[in-house]
Each structure stands twice: as structure tokens, then as C-alpha cells.
Image (cartoon, rainbow, N blue to C red):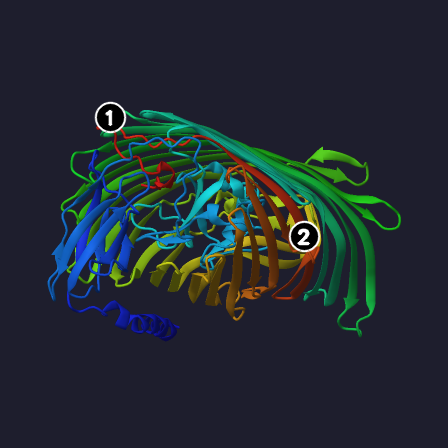
Amino acid sequence: MHKKLLAIFAFIFSFFQANAFYDNSNNNITGKVIDAATKQPIEYATVTVLNKSTKNTVNGTITDATGSFVIKGLAPGNYIFKIQSLGYKDYTINTVTVQKNTPVQLPVVELTKQENVLQDVTVSAKKPLVENKIDKMVFNAEKDLTSQSGVATDLLKKVPMVSVDVDGNVQLAGSSSIQFLINGRPSTAFGNNISDVLQAIPASQIKSIEVITNPGAKYDASGLGGIINIILKDNQSKGVNGNLSLTAGSLLQNGSFNLTARKNKFGVNAFISGGTRLRSTTPNSVDRNSIDTSAKTNVQLLQNGASQFTRHGMQSGLGFDWNLDSLNNLTGGVNYNLFGYAGTGYVNQTQITTDMLNGGNLLSNIASLSNSNGGFHFHNIDANLNYKRKFSKPDQELDIAWNSSFGTNHGYSNSEQYYVPSDTKFFGTQNDNPGTNNVHVMTIDYTQPFTSKIKFGAGSRITLTDIHSTATIHSLNPYTEAYYYDSSQSNYLDYHQQVYAVYSELSFPVGTLFDAQVGGRYERTEINDYYSNATTQVKTPGYNTFVPSFYFIRKLSGNSTLKLSYSKRIERPSYQDLNPFVNTSDPKNITTGNPYLQPQIGNRYELAYNKQINNVGSFMVAAFYRNSNHDIQPYVYYYPTYKVGDSTFTNVSVSTRQNIGIERNMGMNLFASIDVSNALNLRTNMFFYYREQINQLDPGYNANSFNYHINLNASYQFKKDLAAEAFGNFRSARNEVQGRYPSFTTYSLAIRKQFWNKKGSLALTAVNPFNEYVNMRTILSGPNFTTNNLRQVPFRSFGLNFTWKFGKLEFKKDDKDKPDNGNPGGNMDNG
């Protein structure tokens, strides 16, 4: 395994070695761009190099987060440097002389703001679809067309290293252990069913998606796969402006409204968005064969049925930002979120028992019908307040943040089973499960620059989680046909978790070879939990975790970079995984938690190369290796008889979560975006990885497989106001420790017409127009059982989206003491 990993790393490194050292003449041109009024660095300023004699463009780059830039590979001669940034006046250095083996340090460039006022004009700057920074990758979702009428998961399908299955479950670099954030902040909404939350956020509400596969020491250590931060739309321009988006569809309907008002140093923004998935039917069939070794019987369970469900969600928020003076900034906001689903279903069931010792003689054939209904509703309030203090020295900052999320949830389920054809009810449960989930996070971050290229950062974070849940179960007495309070299955839990963290990190250049960022994070986790129906109350001991991380990045000639990174991560079991409550709504397929789970620890290495090709596109390749110990996976056991309280269930599979052992993943991600012409753009995202799982619960039931997913996106601009796009996605089958999960294909088409000077647009989208269902065939096996399952997930949909941008954008010369805000939505609050 390690030889394969080294081979991949060596291949990428040797492939780009010539590019890395293409220019050995040491003719590096370095410089820095800042705001003339505030002296703060300007990121993404464009630096263009022209030959002074021919006036032809010969090189170029953009500034980084510190406002710095490096130009490499220039032959000796005289050049013109042009520096440009949206909202600023252009700046030109008329003569820069380059001599052999002589580096040049340009004077600091100070850009001044534009003085003119643009009214009723839409100003746009072309950003690359994918931006690579030293510690994260940014997918600019606003540029996507086929997802315009969809939801967050439709956008995530197109993000490098991210894959989404037909149920909306997300994996990052092959791992489902992901920390999700909205605008850089945690929310209790993600503490429940993440796929439901993501499928209730309209894609039209999302500005960008940030992906951090190897988070630095500043970020919370949870999430083996890394961090996905969803940045919602927010306009920092002066004046009053906003946008409205409405989608009507055959399967999905959603809408969003944003309003921003800004004057001088104070701005407010408000938004509301929501969506619903219309009622749809999912056929489902199960064929399970099991062996009762004690009774010497073979049992075949056949289930055939269908379920219908709806999903809904709503988000709203009100926020402000206030530049108190040139050095002090205050931001805050309050959000209200609401998510939920409801469904009904039926299952026709046949259980056939045969004798293993007497030629397979039939012992019994029992037919039954199961009806069920259930749902889940969640609402929460997120509140945040953030203070940023800048100093006279550039890049010196103090950030203090407080975030609280108050969540309330309510789940319910009802199930009844009847013998067929007598219609005799022999089983029934009624489950009511209210609860609360509150999280408070306090962070302090400080950055101290020693020089323009050497920075030290340190901070601390306290996360307090308090969860209370009560499950009230009423069970059927088949003799009286009355329901009674079932104390043996009812339960309640109190779960309290405190995580105390401190970190430090240092950014510095290593000569002229590369830039480095090295850090370490220490976390102390304390858990105080109580599960009323646990067999024994076991005190969960506190534990310490040290999380190191590093980044080494080398800027190469031709707008390309090479990056090597490492991080250690931890995945703490959620309270849903720990809760030993036994869900018997389907008495043949029971689910329960495991209060004895241990946290899993992972290590991840990544080597990545990124190249921006001027006027053509971009290319990225990344190789990674990840291992995890005490790996947490869903695990199924088969029992001929299973006792829950006073009830005994027969021929039942019990699904729980277990520390299965060791998992290793090694793979590569390729992303390319190419402008074939001024009208046609092609982009592809290919992810390949090899997974090995060592099962320490049932030795011998190991798994390994080569997995991949590939997507292709093509967009064509017919004319300035008419564009079309097509997207296709394929994900291969994969093996897990207990079985094989199927491959699937999805595709979508879209066409958009803009009008009202591009302030309005109509988009027509179609998803899987020629296939009503995506068929998902799953095979699970373990000691004494094998299960074949077929789910037909409804996927075909059509949608019509209307978008309108309104208001006026004003770019006035700021007061002398006003700092450059940047975009607070993109600042990750994870100290």
C-alpha cells in the first residue's frame, strides 16, 4: 500500500519537476499591492506584464491574500507592469528592467478607489470556476447554470473531490465524515440529517462552496474528510440592491430573496429562502436469506412495497456589518431555519422457513402486510457576533467571535402489521420523540506578522454541546388491540460535550524554494452522558487530541503551483450514533445506537498541482492518502431471536454503528476547465481511489475496491443573453465490509435567457429526462445472512427558474479612514 502511495506522489512530483525548476536564472519579480487609503492588502488584483517594445502580453498573475505576487521566467529586457482590481483605478509601472540572475523587488503599489458612481449598472468580474488557495479550494457556484433551479447537493456534485449519491449523502475525498458550515459557522441544523438540510437549500442562494481537505491548525479538528463551507449570497456594494429567484418544478420547488442596504460605514442584509420536494413514490424490494444454526433452519424473507415522502425547508436571516473606524469592525446576525420531512409506506411481506436437515422441507410460510408513517421536523435559531480589530501594521489582526445555535426537533413514527389474509393486527408501535440541541462556540484568533512574509497565528476555541431527547413508545397489545406505554422501549438521554482547544501556526518562506505553513492544535474533550435504557451506565472518559498540520506550496512559472499538505483529524461519534434507543418500527429490520463507540482518528496526506492557463482555463491534479483507526461504519447483525424489553423479535437484522477496524484510502483527483472557444467551455472532474477496509469485528470479512466517479460539464454561449449547459455524472459501485453498493448515472440539461440588461433571466432545466428512476441494487452479507435490496429512487424532474437582480451599485471613493472589508462571508470562523 505505501509503495503505491509513494509511486503516485513520485509520479506527480517528477512530472512537474521540469516545470518547477524551469527558470533557474533567479529573475524573480516580486511586489505587493495595497489599498492607498487603508494600507490593507488587496487580494485577486491582476498583474499583467507586457514587452515594452512590442506591447504584447508575456506573463501575468494575481495577488494572494497578503497582496503579494511573484512573476517568474522573464527573459532579460524591459517590461511594462499593469496592476488592476475591480473598483480601483488602474496602475502602470512604465519600465521594469530585468537582468540575468538578478531578482527585482518592486515598490509597494498603492491603488486608489474609483471616484465615479455607477448607477443602475451591473458590474461583473470574471473569476475562475475553481480557485486554489494555500489551505482551501473555492468553487464559484454563481457561474453554474444547470444547478440554478436545483438545491445545494446539485452544486456539490460538481465540486472537485466531492461526490453525492442519489439520496443526497455527501462524501469528500471518499469520506462521509465531513464538517459542514454555513458562512464559516456551525449550526445545529447539521447535527441532524445533513442530506435533508442540503436538499432544502436552493442552489440560487449559494454564492460559493469552500472545500478544505486538509484543514490547518486554526480549524476545528472534527471531520475526517475535511470541511465544506457553504457561502450564501451577500452583496457588499453601497446602496440598496437585491435579488429574487423562484423555481417551479415537477419534483423540486424553491425560491430565495436577498436584500442589502449599505450607507457609509454601516450595512444590513436580509434573506429568506426555502424549498420543497413534492410527494414522490419509491418502490422497494428486499430478499434476505438467513440461517438459524441452532434450529437448523433456513429463513427467506421477501419484502415488496413502496414509500411516499415529502421534504421541506426554510432559511431566513438578518445581519449587519459596521466599520466603527479604520481599525475596528463589528458584524453579527440572527438566522431562523426550519427543515422537515414526512412519509408513508407499505410492505407486503412473506417469511418462508425450511428445514436444513430434511431436504429443505417447508416448515412455515407466513404472509403479512406492514403499514407505516412518520416524519421529522427541526427548527433552530442561529445567532452570531464577531469583532475584528486591525492594527497599523498590515496583516496584524485580533478576531473575537461568539456563535450560538438553539435547535428543537420532533420525530414521530407509527407502524402496524397484519396477517394476510385474515387482516389480524399482531404488531404495532407508536413513537413520539421530541428533543433539543444547543451549541455554543466562542473563539479568539490573533495574527502577528513579523515581516511581510512571516506571520504567526494563535487562538483558542470553546465548544459546548447540550442535547436532550425523549422517546415515548406505545406498543400494541394484540389481545386487547389497545396500545400501552412501553417502559422497556421508551427512553430519554442527556448528552453534554465540551471541547476546549488552543492552537498556533506559523507561515514563512523557506528561502526561494517554497512557502510553508506549520501548525498544531490541542483539543480536550469532556463528555457527560446518560442513556436511560443502556444496560449499564458507563462513564465516558475525557480524552486529549493533538492535531498537527502543514502546508508547503511552491509557486511555479506560468501561473502554476505545487502543494504538499498533511493534517490529522478526529471524528467524534454523534449522539445519534451513541443513543442505544431501539427503533422497532420495522420489526424485521431494527436500528439502534452504540454508546460504547470510540472516536476515530485519521491522517491525510495530499500532493497537488494547479495551473491557471491564461485565456484558456485551469487544471488541477491532486494525489492523496488517508488512513483511519477505529473506523466507524454502519454494521448489520442477524439474530434468529432478539429481545427488546419484554418483547421478542424473530428473524431480525439489527443495524448499528461499530468501530470496524482500519480503513485506508489512496487516490487521485483530476479537474480541468477549458475554454475551447469564446462560446464553448468544457470542464471535467475525475476522482479515482483505492479503498481497503480491515474488519476487526468479524475477521475475514474485509473489503477492498477500486472506486471512481467522473463528471463532464459543457456550456455554450449562443449570444450575450442566451446560454445552454449539459452535465453528466457517473459513480462506480463500491465495496464495504458487509457488501456492495451500486453504481449510478445522472445527467441534466439547462438553457437560460437573460433580459432587462442581464438583470433578469429565465432558465429551463431537466434532470434525467429519459429515466424516471435511478435503480439502486445493494448486496449485504455477514455471518449467516445475505440481503439483496432494490430501491427505485425517483429522479426525473423538470424546472423553470426566474431570477431578477435589482437596485444600483455605487463604487464611491471611501472615506480616508475606512478599511477594506473584503467579504466577511468567506472568513472561516473556526478558531
Residue ID for mark 1: 325
Mark closest to the chain's N terminus, 2 or 1 = 1
Q: Secondary structure under badge 2?
A: loop
- In 3D space, how far apart are the residues under numbered discs 2 and 1 (Cα atoms)? 53 Å
Left or right? Give the position of 684 relative to 402: right
Asked whether the residues under the numbered discs 2 and 1 touch, taking CB atoms below 8 Å apart as contact, a structural biologist would say: no
Name the residue nearer the viewer: 622 or 761: 761
Tally of marks: 2
The amino acid sitting under disc 2 is Arg
Q: Quadrant of the N terminus?
A: bottom left
Outermost residue toward the right in this view: 422
Percent across and percent down for residue 698 are 53, 65
Residue ID for mark 2: 796
Q: Residue at x 56, y 57 (%)?
A: 727
Percent across and percent down for residue 255 are 58, 36
Q: Secondary structure under badge 1?
A: loop
Name the residue nearer the viewer: 824 or 530: 824
Name the residue nearer the viewer: 681 or 575: 681
Tell me which corner region of the image, top left, top right, bottom left or bottom right, holds residue 110.
top left
Percent across and percent down for residue 831 are 31, 41
